[in-house]
Amino acid sequence: MSKKTTVKKVVLAYSGGLDTSIILKWLTEEYDCEVVAYSADLGQGEELDGIPAKAKKTGASSCHIVDLKEEFARDFVFPMFRANAVYEGRYFLGTSIARPLIAKAQMEIAAKEGADAVSHGATGKGNDQVRFEVAYYHFDPTIKVIAPWREWTMKSRTALEEYAKKHGIPVPTSKKFPWSSDRNLLHISFEGDILENPWAEAPEEMYQLTVRPEDAPDQPEYVEVEFEKGDAVAVNGERLSPAKLLAKLNVFGGKHGIGRVDLLENRYVGMKSRGVYETPGGTILEEAHRAVESICMDREVMHLRDSLVPRYADMIYNGYWFSPERTVLQALIDASQQTVNGKARIKLYKGHCRVVGRDSATDSLFNVDFATFEKDEVYNQADAEGFIKLNTLRLRIAAIHRQNRK
């Protein structure tokens, strides 16, 4: 059976960039099918301007732009930040956490449109192909997935540009900004071009969300972030929705050059890849969240949760947001957050954010009567002798054994 007869209607995750512009046209030619374009509004701003007109001009029968900003922050970013999830100790998972939501909304449109296939622009080398497709199959195990990068003969950006020129497709590539980027409310990422040389410093003109730390204000600024059950609910006393709160912190962080990260990460498919990221608001949010946890969370609960975070971060990075293991682990994380109620004061200055205060009116476990260096009436320091002897018993027995063997 010819490939062209196997698909009637496909919903394409469409950004209007080089790859998805080519894919839209390629789908209509290769599969001879109707293509519905879909773009998720995750806070990328002006990047969505003109998307519907461009999609239809390139061959789409219709174009859906879905505002997902609040759902993104509330149901994806905030649950992830309750865990302080950072991949390989550096990456705040800004792209990774967006993919399951993009796929979820895409599958909803596919059901509404009666589409029998979905398509994405992820390459066969990257992580996004896994993230999208694991989510697709979670919602419909019978859906047909078209991944053009795994099918067509074009293997480079140059080949795609030639295809675009041949078919009269306008694409936003330029020699001045030749790298690939992905933006949402949590971050912006950059890959490719000069970044493929791990020794080369990322050019300053690459950064979009943050000022150069050296150019940030010469005076520090303080911001207070309030939490309820592990979720940020207010900034400087102003209660805000999750998306608006994250956007507010982005402004603070961007102004002070906070949240720039340059790293080599291990992709799920096996290779190392260099990425440059800007996560201004998320960096402040994570610092503030840890501060409130430090005063409210039981030690052993914190240590247990922390021991599981690398696994949790891997699940998100690798695309398993909708997996049963992530769901079960999320329940444990959320249970650990029930007493994380309070606020943190963060000092912002030239690329750095630092906790300078934390407080909880309802759930603080800090008791100055016990912790003070001054005279107290509640702690008998002599008790420490027995505590130490019991906890070193195995070491003392081992030492006796070594001595007897001499």
Image: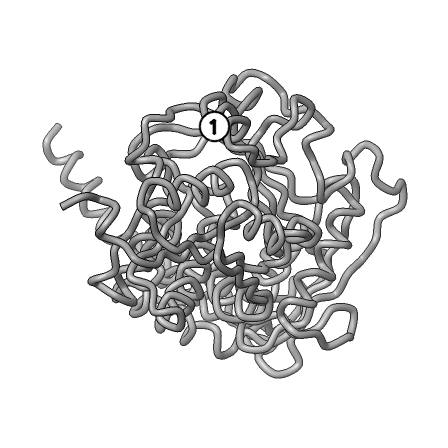
86 sits left or right of 173 in the view:
left
- Residue 196 in percent (x, y) is at 50, 21
Q: How crowded is the residue under tag 1: few (<14 C-alpha within 10 Å), some, or many (20+)?
A: some
Location of residue 375 (image quadrant): bottom right
Q: Quadrant of the C terminus?
A: top left
Frontmost residue, 77 versus 82: 77
- Residue at label 1? 163
- The amino acid type, in three-letter code, at marker 1 is Tyr
Determine if residue 147 is in view: yes
In the image, what residue occupies the spot 25% across and 60% down?
A: 143
Q: Is residue 80 left or right of residue 57?
A: left
Residue 206 in the image: above or below residue 347:
above
Q: Is residue 349 above or below residue 273?
A: below
Residue furthest toward the left? 405
Task: Name the residue: 29% across, 69% down.
Answer: 328
Residue 92 image offset from top left, x and y in percent? 52, 48
* Display colour scheme: one colour
Along the viewing direction, whichever of 39 and 208 lies nearer the viewer:
39
Above or below residue 273? Residue 304 is below
| Residue 287 locus on image (x, y percent) | 62, 55
Q: Residue at point 53% right, 45% down?
A: 58
Residue 293 in the figure: left or right of residue 384: right
Observer able to see residue 307: no
Which element is circle 1 on? helix
As rendered, which of 263 and 18 lies closer to the eye? 18
Give the x, y percent position of residue 310.
Answer: 37, 50
Q: Residue at x 40, y 41 (%)?
A: 122
Which residue appears farthest toward the right when viewing the image?
218
